[in-house]
Image (tube, rainbow, N blue to C red):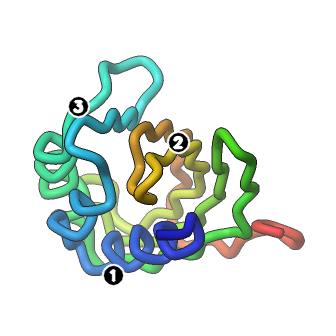
Amino acid sequence: MTPELWIERYRRAWETADADEVADLFTPDAAYRSNVFREPYLGSEAIRQYWQRGAGTQRDVAVRMGRPIITEARVAVEWWTTMIDPDEGEITLPGCLLLRFSPDGRCQDLWEYWQVQPGRQEPPAGWGA
């Protein structure tokens, strides 16, 4: 699986709240760090459960992915998401994924950085390029 295909599958899984699809994108021993100040979710089953609790409660999710930056060791890709969050209502959630892949194309290590803004906002000019 190419990084571009992985990113597209991740985008679709987020929009459809498909925790099984997300789990399939990761190696069985993957690390998923959703916040740099918290311990990572370890393993595809922990990642599935995290997604069920998070994405499974979001509504009207629209995800845009930027053009990835791909090196031999890592991939970085921005995202711009709008949704209805069960606690915060309508929000915009932009962020970035830093990814390391296994030889079979599944993710071994994910770090994400994100921000939240109330309401639905469009990305600024030049975003994701």
Cα gap from disc 3 to disc 2, whole angstroms: 14 Å
Three-letter code for the amino acid on which mark 1 is drawn: Asp
**Residues at marks 2 and 1 touching, judged by CB atoms closer than 8 Å:** no
Residue at the location (83% across, 69% down)?
129
The residue that label 2 is drawn on is 100
Is residue 60 or residue 126 the one in the foreground?
Answer: 126
Of mark 1 and mark 3, the one earlier in the sequence is 3
Regarding mark 2 in the picture, which secondary structure is present there?
A: strand
Of circles 3 and 2, the one toward us is: 2
Of circles 2 and 1, the one toward us is: 2
Is residue 31 or residue 103 the one in the foreground?
Answer: 103
Of mark 2 and mark 1, the one earlier in the sequence is 1
Instruction: Give me the disc on residue 45.
Output: none
- Above or below for 123 versus 26: below
Residue 37 is situated, as x and y percent measured from the top left of the image, at 42, 18
Locate residue 70: give its quadrant: bottom right
The residue that label 3 is drawn on is 42
Residue 104 is situated, as x and y percent measured from the top left of the image, at 41, 57
Of mark 3 and mark 2, the one earlier in the sequence is 3
Residue 63 is situated, as x and y percent measured from the top left of the image, at 49, 75
Instruction: Give me the disc on residue 60.
Output: 1
Residue 91 is situated, as x and y percent measured from the top left of the image, at 46, 63
Three-letter code for the amino acid on which mark 2 is drawn: Arg
Residue at the location (49% across, 76% down)?
8
- Above or below for 85 versus 74: below
